[in-house]
Image (cartoon, rainbow, N blue to C red):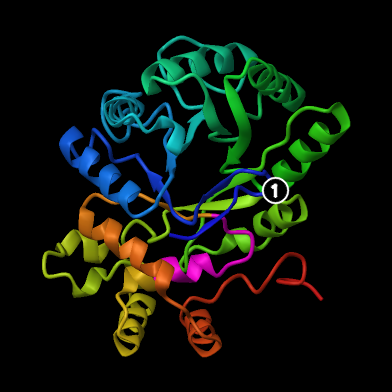
């Protein structure tokens, strides 16, 4: 396993983060335990969750994934070996203050996550989405209080635009509040819009990028070559199908599975700390781990850019002189 710093923070984490979104609603507790056991055996120490995982649209029990992770850590007795991340923002109930980033909800949400996880602190507590109705100084003040109380160690963001990252960093610098050290965004070969402003902003402020959906919901995992593919899954490829056909052909020429290439490509991208993988099987987990040993040369990277062209670089040069 390879390790790197968590953005500009001093802590180090594995180059792969194990996402737990599927734990509970998609795979049962026994299968979830097996995946976590295998991940730790391979050296993964970075585990990512969210308070809403297990709830809609995944299932009917928000908090279920945190609970499974919490029980596993208690049974294995390995909490201190792990860097545990979770998130706050999504709806956890029907009351007006059961969602968002108000100081009121953040205070209730962190205590609930700590109970479900069976731990005394969250190593990386992430804002799951921007909340346009709450002033950022209120949000950052609430997180500062949590850090003073020892309930969280580092702060992160998720699904923020580039200008959101800049605003929160500047407000934090002016006020002395803790600033986010990571941003978790959708990022993969087929979805590269974050290269316009999110990636440059993260680099400017020393934030580590945690790409979610590294296989574009499975479309980069060899979907055309799978014998169990359904007609609906192929129809869902839409306008991407020609690129996926060329991509799978190219991966065949390389002799490397498409999912491995996709994650290896992300590991080469500036500011990326760790792709967040969400395996449903041990084989999918092992495929992601395999990517750590893959080196993509300049010619291969150039061909991947031809198949999956990005936005043309950072803004404004991507669309202006």
Measuring from the top left, give residue 203's x and y in whole percent. Answer: 72, 57
Judge whether residue 44 is colored magenta: no
Measuring from the top left, give residue 165's x and y in whole percent. Answer: 71, 44
Say whether residue 123 is visible.
yes
Between 72 and 200, the residue placed more toward the observer is: 72
- Work out whether 140 lies above or below 83: above
Q: Residue furthest left?
A: 228
Q: Residues within 10 Å of mark 1 (few under 14, many from 20)?
A: some
- Work out whether 300 lies above or below 151: below
Snapshot quadrant of residue 255: bottom left
- Looking at the image, which residue is at 72% across and 71% down? 319
- Looking at the image, which residue is at 44% across and 22% down? 91
Which image quadrant: the N terminus?
bottom left
Measuring from the top left, give residue 73's x and y in whole percent. Answer: 33, 30
- Looking at the image, which residue is at 53% across and 34% down? 128
- Work out whether 241 lies above or below 275: below
Describe the element under mark 1 as helix, strand or loop. Answer: loop
Question: Mark 1 — residue?
Answer: 8
Which image quadrant: the C terminus?
bottom right
Magenta region: 262-273
Left or right relative to 282: residue 3? right
- Looking at the image, which residue is at 65% across and 74% down? 312
Between 15 and 128, the residue placed more toward the observer is: 15
């Amino acid at each position: 396993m390879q390790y790197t710093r968590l953005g500009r923070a001093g802590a180090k984490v594995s180059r792969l983060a194990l996402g737990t979104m599927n734990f509970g609603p998609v795979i049962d507790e026994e299968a979830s335990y097996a995946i976590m056991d295998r991940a730790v055996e391979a050296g993964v120490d970075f585990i990512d969750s969210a308070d809403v995982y297990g709830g809609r649209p995944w299932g009917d029990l928000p908090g279920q994934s945190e609970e499974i992770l919490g029980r596993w850590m208690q049974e294995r007795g390995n909490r201190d070996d792990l860097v545990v991340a979770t998130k706050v923002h999504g709806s956890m109930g029907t009351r007006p203050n059961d969602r968002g980033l108000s100081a009121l909800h953040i205070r209730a949400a962190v205590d609930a996550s700590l109970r479900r996880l069976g731990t005394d602190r969250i190593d990386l507590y992430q804002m799951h989405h921007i909340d346009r109705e709450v002033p950022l100084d209120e949000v950052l003040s609430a997180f500062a209080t949590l850090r003073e109380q020892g309930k969280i160690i580092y702060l992160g963001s998720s699904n923020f635009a580039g200008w959101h990252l800049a605003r929160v960093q500047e407000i934090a610098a002016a006020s002395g509040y803790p600033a986010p050290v990571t941003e978790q965004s959708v990022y993969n070969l087929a979805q590269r819009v974050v290269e316009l402003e999110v990636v440059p902003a993260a680099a400017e402020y020393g934030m580590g990028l945690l790409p979610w959906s590294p296989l574009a919901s499975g479309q980069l995992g060899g979907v055309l070559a799978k014998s169990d593919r359904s007609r609906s899954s192929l129809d869902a490829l839409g306008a991407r199908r020609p690129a996926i056909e060329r991509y799978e052909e190219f991966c065949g020429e390389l002799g490397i599975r498409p999912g491995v290439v996709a994650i290896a490509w992300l590991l080469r991208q500036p500011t990326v700390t760790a792709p967040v993988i969400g395996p449903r099987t041990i084989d999918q987990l092992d495929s992601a781990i395999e990517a750590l040993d893959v080196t993509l040369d300049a010619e291969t990277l150039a061909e991947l850019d031809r198949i999956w062209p990005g936005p043309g670089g950072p803004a404004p040069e991507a669309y202006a002189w």
